[in-house]
Amino acid sequence: MDFDRLKQLFGVYGAEPNRWPAHERDEAIRLRSLAEPVDAPTARALDDLLDAWVVDAASLDLRRRILNQAPGLRRSTWRSLGLWVQGACLAAACAAGLLAGLSFGRVDYGGRAADRETDAVAAYDAGTIAAQPADSETT
Amino acid sequence: MPPLMDPRRTMAADKPETIRDVKRRPHGLLVLRNEAGSGQGGVDPDGELVIGVAAGDPAAVRALVARKLPRILALARRMLTDSVEAEDVAQEVFLRIWRHAGSWRPGGARFDTWMHRVALNLCYDRLRRRREQPTAEPPEQVDAGPAPDRGLEAADVGRQVEKAMAALPSRQREAVVLCHYQELSNIDAAELMEISVEALESLLSRARRSLRVALADAARPR
């Protein structure tokens, strides 16, 4: 390797030796220790600028979507789906029980109400019957 | 269905060796040799994870996602300069990994190189579609120019770099993304781009010259 090639490495790959071709790296580092090309600071500055472009990390949602498609985790998806179904069934059973309870309650309450209504009518009738003779006496 | 190690080829009549065909080494680990393709040789660092994924091991799946998702997302984001499209590409890449992990065969290019190729192909599909269906108005570019009386903040520099990168010809941008940001070797990058190393160096050299000019205000040699 000569200094022209070293200068070329800076211009092509930048100032970071890890980006230089593996088979030339050691020799290039040795050569650079003797004399750094004049373009080296410019190459280093451009490297720093390029590194300033940082992209956003992967969102949790994207990670979740990818994992949900994965072969080893699909079972987990089905399992969680099964849990959802079980939960839904339980909720439905509770709702049915509640409705049934309310329904029976209404019948019971209605029955008692009917009884009370019957009693009231009977009492009224009884009162009426009791009052009627007096009325009939006056008429 | 294309084999995992070369998404551009259709599966030939000769059935590729699958991961399950790889024999166990005496020390108990499945070792995938990279005997051809990348020019780097040695054990594929992702080989065992890919085997785990093929076997449906949830831990391997999670580890592969943790290791590779940031790289793939960054690649797509920098190639497409669009976060939503980049996420779509990343998801599609992993979908293909899940589908083809079982047919991964050692001896070809590294898994990471294959994954990059899939991602790049997807990116180019989208870039091609953009050209074929031009929008009525180009996407609004945020003016990243700094105020004259102050230096560039880090975010401003990042936006300027993004703008300068987006203005590069696509092949030059691809070369910079692969070599600088993805830190692929020149041989892997050249292989991915299906060009010689000399051609890759020419692209990189021109790209860096253009970037220096575009970022002249921000570039301050130290």
Image (tube, rainbow, N blue to C red):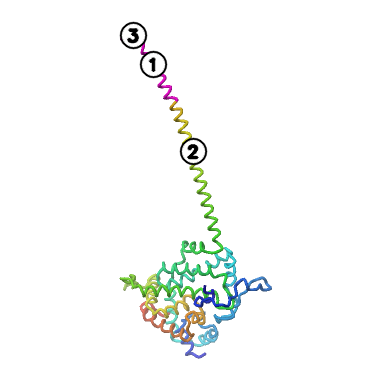
Residue A122, located in which quarter of the rendered image? top left
Alpha carbons under labels 3 and 1: distance apart: 16 Å
Of labels 1 and 2, earlier in sequence is 2
Chief SS of the magenta region = helix
Residue type (three-letter) at the residue carrying disc 2: Ala
Q: Which of marks 2 and 3 is in front?
A: 3
Instruction: Give the residue displayed 38% in from the left and 82% down from the top.
Output: B210
Q: Nearer the viewer, mark 3 or mark 1?
A: 3
User: Between residues A42 and B185, which one lies in front from this camera angle?
Assistant: B185
Q: Is mark 1 on a helix, strand or loop?
A: helix
Question: Residue under circle 3?
Answer: A137
Question: Residue under circle 2?
Answer: A100
Q: In this view, does B120 lie to the left or right of B130?
A: right
Alpha carbons under labels 1 and 2: distance apart: 40 Å
User: Between residues A108 and A23, which one lies in front from this camera angle?
Assistant: A108
Alpha carbons under labels 2 and 3: distance apart: 55 Å
Q: What element carries label 3?
A: helix
**Mark 1 residue crowding within 10 angstroms, few (<14) / some (14–19) / many (20+):** few
Q: Is residue A120 one of those drawn in magenta?
A: yes
Residue type (three-letter) at the residue carrying disc 3: Glu
User: Between residues B76 and A81, which one lies in front from this camera angle?
Assistant: A81
Q: Give the percent coordinates (x, y) of residue B207.
A: 41, 81
- Indicate the chain on which mark 3 is placed: A
- Indicate the chain on which mark 2 is placed: A
Question: Residue under circle 1?
Answer: A127
Of labels 2 and 3, earlier in sequence is 2
Instruction: Give the residue displayed 55% in from the left and 81% down from the top.
Output: B37
Q: Give the percent coordinates (x, y) of residue B84.
A: 41, 67
Residue type (three-letter) at the residue carrying disc 1: Gly
Q: Give the percent coordinates (x, y) of residue B13.
A: 56, 77
Q: Give the percent coordinates (x, y) of residue B182.
A: 48, 75
**Mark 2 residue crowding within 10 angstroms, few (<14) / some (14–19) / many (20+):** few
